[in-house]
Image: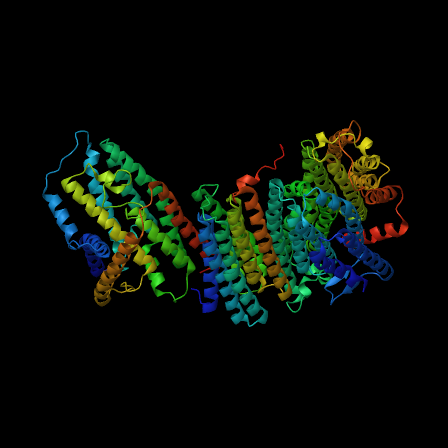
Amino acid sequence: MTPLDWLTQLLEMLAALAAAPLFVGWINQCRAWLQNRSAPSILQPYRAIRKLFYKDAVLATHASSFFRVAPYVVFGAMVGAAAVIPSVSTRLPFSNAADAIALVGLFATARVFISLAAMDVGTAFGSLGARREMLVGFLAEPALLMVIFVASLISASTALPAISEGLATRTLALYPSLAFTGVAFVLVLLAENARIPVDNPATHLELTMIHEAMLLEYSARHLALMEWAAALKLFNYACIGFALFLPWGLATGDSPNPGTLLASIPVLAGKLAIAGAALAVIETVSAKLRVFRAPEFLATAFLLAVLGLLVHLLLGA
Amino acid sequence: MSNSSIDLQLLNAFASLLLLLSFAMLSQRRIVTMVKLLAMQGMLLGLATLLLAVRTGQNHLYISAALTLSLKALFMPWVLHRLIKRLGVYWDSEPLLNITVTMLAGLLIVIFSFGLAQPIAEFANTATRSAIGIAVAVVLLAFLTMITRGKAMSQVVGFLSMENGLFFGAMSASYGMPMIIELGVALDVLVAMLVLGVFFFQIREQFDSLDLHHLEKLREEK
Amino acid sequence: MEFLALLVAPILGAVILAFFGARRFAPEANVAISVVTFAAACALTVRVISEGSITAANEQFFIDPFNVFLVTLTAFVSLNTSLFSRPYMRIEREHGRVNSAQSRLYHSMYQLFIAAMLIALTTNNMGLMWVAMEAATLSTVLLVTLYRTPSSLEAGWKYFILCGVGIAQALFGTILLYVAAESVLGAEGMSALLWTHLNGVKGQLEPAVLSLAFVFLLVGYGTKVGLAPLHNWLPDAHAEGPTPISAVLSGLLLNVAIYAVVRCKVLVEGSLKSDLPSQMLMGFGLLSVVLAAFFLWRQRDIKRLLAYSSIEHMGIIAFAFGMGGAVANFAALLHMTVHSLTKSAIFFAVGHAAQKSGTQIMDDIRGLLTLSPTVGWGLMLGTLAILGMPPFGVFASEFLILTTAMQQQPWATPILLMALGVAFAAIFGRVQPMVFGETTAKRLPHPPALLPVFAHLALVLMLGLYIPSYLADWYRLAARLIAGQ
């Protein structure tokens, strides 16, 4: 590993931290346009986070120290995840530390902490949100793992950089298995990031909310970290998707090359712009599912991923 | 990795889509949509046959493809649509089992049928032999669809989907049966549709509904 | 020539009756067509006996001692059934249970059904056999629902769906058979589906594929045989359709289905060189016998009772074919013959009895002997015959099967004996009060057709006392053929 690789690693993490709220802002802007509303500024999430950091934190009297630690852990887990995912280059020193399966574990850690913290205060909404979050999680995680398995089977590795490098350099062919898992991944992404068919990030309706219910007791810097972590999570998922299904344009190869590295940044920005717009379209055209239907939604994702796996095993494609 | 030709890749893609459609049918609540899915399945089957005909240059496959496209993709769905309209059975057919459970059962079935097809696939000498497992899976999934529905119409859709799977199996294992047999099978399926049509009207006349729960009187306790 | 007449007569008959099936002379026309078919079958038999196996229509059809005897049996029973249905359908029309359209449907479909069975029996092409079996199912579905009552619709629906699914499995089995044969015989022409060709190369067929094919074929055609646990359609279809149809379903269709299974078994056994097909047949057979014996106790409807009895006998036949060997096959063939004759005779008698009493519920049918001694005695004798009482033919075949079982599969003998005992008690206990005792029923306007009943029973009696040497030779030939020698 050369110093340039470490520089790349640092750059990538910083880029993730900076770009994540921007990505959320872009999605919100697209959604507003699609719904014929006047759009908020793309920088709105930054403003919200900054505003929250200036405020004084209010803690419930029953809150334990766990409640205060949780936002840092969740945020840390997301930054760690961002360090492993090859969003601009596949030469990442940190990525040796965790393969794709550990990455799923990292997301699971964040989920456990956020859910425990939500139950810590003991309000009804917190427990309700935590319960729903766990329901979604226990269905979404196997699906995500299956998606990753298919990609690893094709490229014979579980490390994300190796997977995307393998997929980017293969001969172009029809892969029905990748198509199935791609759809499955989008479904998982929607469910895990509290997007519309499963959850609606923009409302606080007790009957339907999942993610928001868990954050109700947080304020100020804790809330800011949680919101930022949520944005990072969405950004991370998008980057996993790019790594698995659209690996072209990444800086690959054995020797560090500043040229390709620089070229890959606009490519990433372009992919994010398209993905954000697509996400906004999905959220606009689909209706929110009843919470009881969420398991079905995720079962579909799991099913598609397993089908992809089976089809790959059977047809070798 | 996969350096096979583009038409084989297309065939594999068709096979996977057939499987996906079977699952879609399994999870579908609305009968009209089920019929549409059936038509899509027939269409895919026809296209796959056509592709195979081009690939192998066997004349009888062209006829088979034309037959499949006209019968399975157009005529039968049309008849079913008309029947639905005439009988007014638009209602949703809620499966007897929870959909998630059904899906998981379906997955197990797919694994089972892939295992089942293994010896055949090893033996067959067609380029499409790996798709035999998918054909078996489509047959068994259609069977599951029939078991989990209480409505006559959905059972018929399942039945026809099973027929599709069998056709696909014959095609991928041996590029289709001899022409006369295929014609005979097609004729039988057509007559079956006719008999069913008559049957539906009789059931409807008697019960004012096509719900098969009415048809559970003949038990041994009687 | 004879062969052409055999197939053309019922098909042409079906077309004619589709137009004129409601006329006054339709039942007689039905009989006349059946007579022609039977005459052709007899002529064909004579020819096969004198000349040996023959093929026709570019080897698509093939007649050997095994199927020619079933052809004759089919033609004979269908002739007698048409005789029986003549007064039966007249009465049904006068009672208003059947209108003119239904009468047309009935007569036309009856002939079509016979034609489909004859094609299934005589074809050499496994694919064509499948098509004919499916056609036989389809032609009887609408006959089962002839009365349009809720329960008959239910029976028809079950029949259609279960047999449809079953026969789809058989199609898959046929496809697998074709796949296995194609690599040996080549895809050109129809060779890879012709039974005679397959039989010639059966040692070279891939065993793994063939064993899988046999599972599908057995499940598929086994559904039509009524082997447990796929027998659900059979009692309903038998009980709800018109009685002549019950008679041919039970007496003929089940035979044809088991014929298809046996044809497949010969091929698969030749390829596998293991006893998997035999064991599967024995297992399904034994299960059917036991299950049917116990279900017999719960029946209240006479035709359902008889249907379960058919399942039991099909189980016995499947078991006998499963044991294999010249003697067991001989016994199975004999049992197919006598069961078919006896069961149709009982259905004829029951048809008249039910029409006289206006019900099929056994508790409501009483004193048949005082009402009509001939119907009463017909039912009684038929029941005794089907229960395996000496000196009837069923006794002879069951005795042969049991003694062979004692030698080859001793473990199965007590199970078979127990099931037969249970069945005996169940059926005899139900039928006895129906025949003897007081009556409330009225006489019918048309005299019952009793010739078929007693003709069948006389034949069964004859087969029990003495099997003519030419018939025995014929059975032996067929048995050896099935044993693959």
Find residue C485 and report its horizontal and vertical position in percent.
79, 55
Find residue C318 and report its horizontal and vertical position in percent.
72, 45
Q: Is residue B139 visible?
A: yes
Find residue B180 and report its horizontal and vertical position in percent.
64, 65
Question: Which quadrant: the N terminus of chain C?
Answer: bottom right
In the image, is residue C91 above or below residue C69? above
Identify which residue, B108 or C348, lies in the foreground.
C348
Q: Is residue A95 visible?
A: no
Count of marks, rendered view: 0
Q: Residue at x 57, y 40 (%)?
A: B215
- Decide if residue C68 is on the left or right side of residue B90: right
**Quarter assignment of residue A72:** top left
In the image, is residue B129 above or below residue B100? below
Identify which residue, B15 or C375, lies in the foreground.
C375
Q: How is the image coloured?
A: rainbow
- Decide if residue C337 is on the left or right side of residue A313: right
Find residue C431 and report its horizontal and vertical position in percent.
76, 32
- Decide if residue A252 is on the left or right side of residue C186: left
Q: Residue at x 22, y 67 (%)?
A: A259
Q: Residue at x 54, y 66 (%)?
A: B65
**Quarter assignment of residue C97:** top right
